[in-house]
Amino acid sequence: MGDTMEIQLPDIEEIKLEDVLIKRRSVREYCSSPLTLRELSHILFAAYGVTDERGFKTVPSAGATYPLEIYVNVRDVVGVEEGVYKYIPERHSIVRILDEEVGHELALAALKQMFIAIAPIVLIIAANYERTTRVYGDRGFRYVHMEVGHVAQNVYLMATSLGLGTVSVGAFYDNEIREILKIKEYPLLLMPVGRKIE
């Protein structure tokens, strides 16, 4: 891997919630058009962005333990080099952890769901369970899984508001995803995001 690259993401704009609730659907087919940095910024902020100076985020978290890490495979975003990035919510930025994008590998690890390889970005939501279980014991596992659901719904709604499509993918080989990304956390969900085919 080359030098560490951190990219500051654009500010967030307001959206109307009622419209996106009605239009939200799972989308598995994407155009070949790239996403913009603004769109990537909005998706990541919706997923796990910091909303105030106390460190609270866009999703509820048991005891504010925030056990999740958001990674993004960037295949085609204007002005962003391809690769795998880690989202840094506190700075609303991304840091590249792998120099090459791994969409094809992710698709194969997800039981050959090849639409994952075509998407301009793929979010990988992973958990460090210990952040929550050290406070809540075994009940913490449930809380972590609830939090992943909150993140997924936020991503669905933001994608819809931007005219994009996404889908929650839970069928994959966990250890293969960890090996591909070279991460210690446990992957819980993949969310490819792209422009819908009209």
Image (spheres, helix red, strand yellow):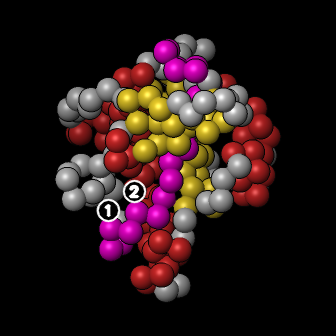
Q: Is residue 139 above or below residue 164?
A: below
- State the residue in front, 160 or 8: 8
Residue occupying image coordinates x 20% and y 51% = 52
Under circle 1, the secondary element is loop
Q: Is residue 183 above or below residue 35?
A: below
For mark 2, what is the residue?
Answer: 150
Residue type at mark 2: give it: His
Residue 131 image point, x, y percent: 47, 71
Q: Quadrant of the N terminus?
A: top right
Q: Earlier in the sequence, mark 2 or mark 1?
A: 1
Q: Are marks 2 and 1 in contact (CB under 8 Å)?
A: yes
- In the figure, 68 relative to 181: above or below? below
Classify mark 2: helix, strand or loop. helix
Q: Using the rendered view, name the quadrant where residue 23 is placed.
A: top left
Instruction: Tell me which segment is drawn in magenta.
Output: 62-81
52 is higher (above) or lower (below) than 14: below
Question: Residue 68 at what x, y percent from top left?
Answer: 48, 58
Between 107 and 163, the one lying in front of the other is 107
Q: Check disc 2: other Cα within 10 Å, few if <14, some if 14-19, many if 20+.
A: some
Is 72 covered by the magenta stretch? yes
Q: Residue at x 23, y 39 (%)?
A: 18
User: Which circle marks residue 60 in the picture?
Assistant: 1
Q: Write the residue at 49% across / 79% down.
A: 133
- Give residue 109's position: percent from left, percent from top: 77, 46
Viewer can see residue 130 = yes
Task: Please identify the residue farthest to the bottom as the structure is shown.
Answer: 137
- Answer whether residue 168 is visible to the viewer in this image: no
For mark 1, does the 10 Å Cα neighbourhood hold few (<14), some (14 to 19), or many (20 or more) residues? some
Q: Disc 2 to disc 1, how far (Cα)?
A: 7 Å
Mark 1: amino acid: Pro
| Residue placed most toward the observer, 198 or 151 | 151
Of badges 2 and 1, the one in the foreground is 1
